[in-house]
Structures are given as C-alpha cells and as structure tokens.
C-alpha cells in the first residue's frame, strides 16, 4: 500500500521543518518538537543500505566532519515525496587523504554510528582530494518511499 500525498507532505513537514501534522489522532495532531534540533549530513563511499548507520561506508579524509542542518523552515524544499536542500551544503576542506563520495545521508548524530534516516546517490560522484571542499547543491535530492 502506498502513502498518499497528504501523508507524505505531513510527514516531511513534521520531520524536516518541525511543523505540526494536524488531525492525526485528535485536532492537535502530531506536534513538532519544542526544541527542533539538527540533522547531520554525511558522505559515503558506497550505499549504506537500509540497515546501515551513519558511519557505514562513511568517507574518512583528513578534515572531514558531518554538517549540521537545523530542523526548521527554509532548510529544505519539497515537491511530492522528494526533498532537497534550500542552499548549498559545504563540508570541511580535505587536508589529507582522498575519497570518492557516491552517496549522501541525513542522520541524527554529529559523530559515531547514529541513526541514518535517508540516503541518496550523488550524481555525479564527488572525487575528494587535498585542498578540495566537497559540496552538495540544491540539486541533491532525497525521496521518501
């Protein structure tokens, strides 16, 4: 059974923008958090898979760190079950080593094996080497399925 457009939109609004999803259960519905917090964007050298965590196949160049994205209005754009970044997301510059990022992920932790919520292939992949600053643009998309 597939989710309808209203359910998809309500879930994405709640999860990404911390907007209440009304009329679920009662008139107040599913409430956004009082302290919305952040998601953390990660880069991966292979598909982490549905059971992977944030550090599954995560890149490991010198200087790499996950990028915090605040849950709130204006961080993402949405169309149907697809969402993307509202602005370019830049990772720390590579100061040593190299990696090829083929997937990006959005998860719950700034470090370690946090819960990976979404992943998506990066096309074209990002060849990262010393002196480069990897970026994901507004064209990077994730799909809720």
Image (tube, rainbow, N blue to C red):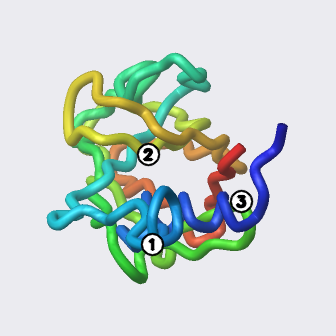
Q: Residues within 10 Å of mark 3 (few under 14, many from 20)?
A: some
Rounded to the nearest angstrom, the CA distance separating label 2 from label 3 is 16 Å
Of the numbered discs 1 and 2, the one sitting upstream in the chain is 1
Residue 81: mark: 3
Of the numbered discs 2 and 3, the one sitting upstream in the chain is 3
The image quadrant of residue 43 is top left
Is residue 17 visible in the rendered image? The answer is no
Question: Disc 2, disc 3: CB below 8 Å?
Answer: no
Residue located 71% across and 72% down the image: 79
For the C terminus, the image quarter is top right
The image quadrant of residue 141 is bottom right
- Front residue of 58/68: it is 68
- Front residue of 126/86: it is 86
Q: Which residue is mark 1?
A: 27
The percent coordinates of residue 44 (x first, y second) are 49, 32
For the N terminus, the image quarter is top right
Q: Which residue is mark 2?
A: 106
């Amino acid at each position: 059974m597939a989710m309808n457009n209203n359910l998809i939109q309500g879930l994405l609004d709640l999860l990404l923008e911390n907007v209440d999803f009304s009329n679920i259960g009662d008139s107040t519905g599913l409430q956004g958090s009082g302290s919305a917090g952040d998601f953390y964007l990660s880069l991966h050298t292979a598909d982490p898979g549905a059971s992977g965590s944030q550090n599954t196949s995560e890149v490991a160049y010198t200087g790499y760190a996950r990028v915090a994205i605040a849950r709130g209005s204006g961080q993402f754009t949405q169309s149907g079950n697809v969402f993307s970044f509202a602005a370019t997301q830049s990772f720390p510059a590579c100061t040593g080593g190299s990696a090829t990022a083929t997937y990006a992920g959005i998860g719950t932790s700034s470090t370690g094996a946090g819960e990976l919520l979404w992943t998506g292939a990066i096309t074209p992949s990002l060849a990262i080497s010393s002196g480069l600053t990897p970026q994901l643009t507004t064209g990077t998309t994730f799909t809720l399925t």
